[in-house]
Image (cartoon, rainbow, N blue to C red):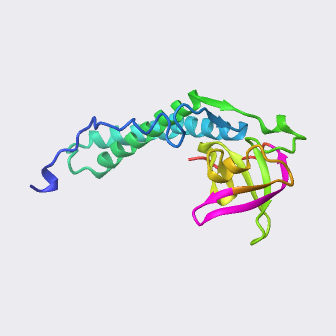
Amino acid sequence: MSKAFTKEPDDEQEEDSDVPAAGLPSGAPNYLTPSGYAALTAELQQLLKVERPKTVEIVSWAASNGDRSENGDYIYGKRRLREIDRRLRFLTKRLAIAQVVDPAAQAGNDQVFFGATVCIEDGHSGPQTYRIVGVDETHLGAHHISWISPMARALIKSREGDTVTVQSPSGPREVTVISVRYTDEPQQPVG
C-alpha cells in the first residue's frame, strides 16, 4: 500500500514514560540553580505563549485549505504541535519537582557542593574548570556538569587541595582540587 493512502492518527499516543524523571535517579530531587530555573521557566513561557499559538494558527489555516492527507503544512504543523506539547509536559513536570539551590549562599565555603565552580588538575593536562549544576542545566561545551555525573560525584564534599579518584571511561583518574568558588553565573539556554 502506498504511503499516500495511509492515515496518520491525529491523536497519536505519546510516550510519557520518559517525561517525569529523564536523567534523574529514582526518587532524587531535581536540583536547579536560580539561573537554570529561570532558563527553564523562560523556555516554558516561550513555548506556551509564542510557539504553540503560532503553530496552532498554522495548523488551522492549513486545515481550512482542504485535503489534509497531502497537505505538508498541516502534517508538519500537527507533528510540531505534538513536539511542543511533549516538551511543555516535560518542562511542567520538571519545574514542579525542582528544588532551587542558590550557590551564592555557599560563598566562602572551600568544600565542593551543588553549584560549585571547581578548578581541578590531573597532572597530565592543564587545569580544568567545571561547574556542578542540575541535570537539566548540563552543557558540556561550557563545562557545566550534572551533579550525578561521575566527575561531580567524585568531587562532592572534597576541599581545596584534596586529591580524589574519578571513574572515567578510560579507567580511574586522580585529580586534585585547586580551587572552589560559588557564584550563580548566567546559564546557556537550556533545552
Asked whether the viewer can see residue 85, the reply is: yes
Classified by dominant secondary structure, the portion drawn in magenta counts as strand
Q: Position of residue 74 (x, y in %)?
A: 30, 45
Q: Residue at x 16, y 55 (%)?
A: 3
Location of residue 94 in the rendering, given as x and y in whole percent from the top left corner? 55, 33
Which quarter of the rendering shows the N terminus? bottom left
Name the residue furthest bottom.
124
Locate residue 105, reporting x and y percent: 83, 34
Q: Is residue 129 above or below residue 94?
A: below
**Stretch of the chain drawn in magenta:** 166-183
User: Could you say which is closer to the camera, residue 51 or residue 146?
Assistant: 146
Along the viewing direction, whichever of 75 and 31 lies nearer the viewer: 31
Is 180 one of the magenta-colored residues?
yes
- In the image, taking residue 126 as reference, residue 189 lies left or right, namely left
**Residue pictured at 68% horizontal, 45% vertical:** 133
Q: Is residue 151 left or right of residue 161?
A: left
Horizontal side of residue 142 vs 48, given as left or right: right
Please provide percent x and percent y for residue 143.
Answer: 69, 57
- Residue visible at 15% across and 48% down in the picture: 6
